[in-house]
Image (cartoon, rainbow, N blue to C red):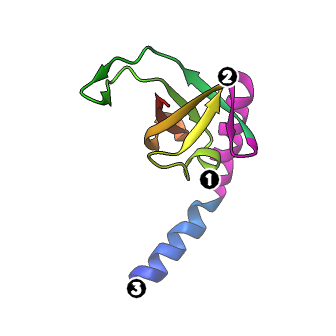
């Protein structure tokens, strides 16, 4: 079987699980979200972890604020993108998957 056909077959097989994961993520965020994030004109629920940031030679340290949310809402935000949480504007420092299928953004002040 060619790689393309194998990938398509695997994707089709896993598709129902992806839908279930999205439903579980939405339920978790519905119960645990502690903030709303503005991304352009959209408002999305997030788990926001606000920590003090100590500048170190122009870079933020590992204690930077972060937020987690549904991958569908956050995965398109790359380094430098802006997001507003609780009235404050943040810049995305890192973007990637988090535990449990959510998407994590590490944030710095603007």
Q: How many other residues sit within 10 Å of disc 1, few (<14), some (14-19) or many (≥20)?
A: few
Tell me which residue sits at (34%, 17%) in the image.
54
Instruction: Give the percent coordinates (x, y) of residue 97.
Output: 46, 43
Task: Find the residue positioned furthest to the left.
Answer: 57
Residue toward you, 95 or 59:
59
Q: Earlier in the sequence, mark 1 or mark 2?
A: 1
> Residue 17's mark?
1
Contact (Cβ within 8 Å) of mark 1 with mark 3: no
> Residue 86's mark?
2
Instruction: Give the percent coordinates (x, y) of residue 95.
Output: 45, 43
State yes or no: residue 28 in magenta: yes
| Residues drawn in magenta | 16-42
Mark 1: secondary structure:
helix
For the residues labelled 1 and 2, the Cα–Cα distance comes to 33 Å
Question: Which residue is disc 3 drawn over?
Answer: 2
**Along the horizontal axis of the image, is 92 left or right of 85?**
left
Mark 3: secondary structure:
loop
Residue toward you, 47 or 38:
38
Mark 2: secondary structure:
loop
- Comparing marks 2 and 3, which lies closer to the viewer? 2
Q: How many other residues sit within 10 Å of disc 3, few (<14), some (14-19) or many (≥20)?
A: few
> Residue 68's mark?
none
Instruction: Give the percent coordinates (x, y) of residue 57.
Output: 24, 27
């Amino acid at each position: 079987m060619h790689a393309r056909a194998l990938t398509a077959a695997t994707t089709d097989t896993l598709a129902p699980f992806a839908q279930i994961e999205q439903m579980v993520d939405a339920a978790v965020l519905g119960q645990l979200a502690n903030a709303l994030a503005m991304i352009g004109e959209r408002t999305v629920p997030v788990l926001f972890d606000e920590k003090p940031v100590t500048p170190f030679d122009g870079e933020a340290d590992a204690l930077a604020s972060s937020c987690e949310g549904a991958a569908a809402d956050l995965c398109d935000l790359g380094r430098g993108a802006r997001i507003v949480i609780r009235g404050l504007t943040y810049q995305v420092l890192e973007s990637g998957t988090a535990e449990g299928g959510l998407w994590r953004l590490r944030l710095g002040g603007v």
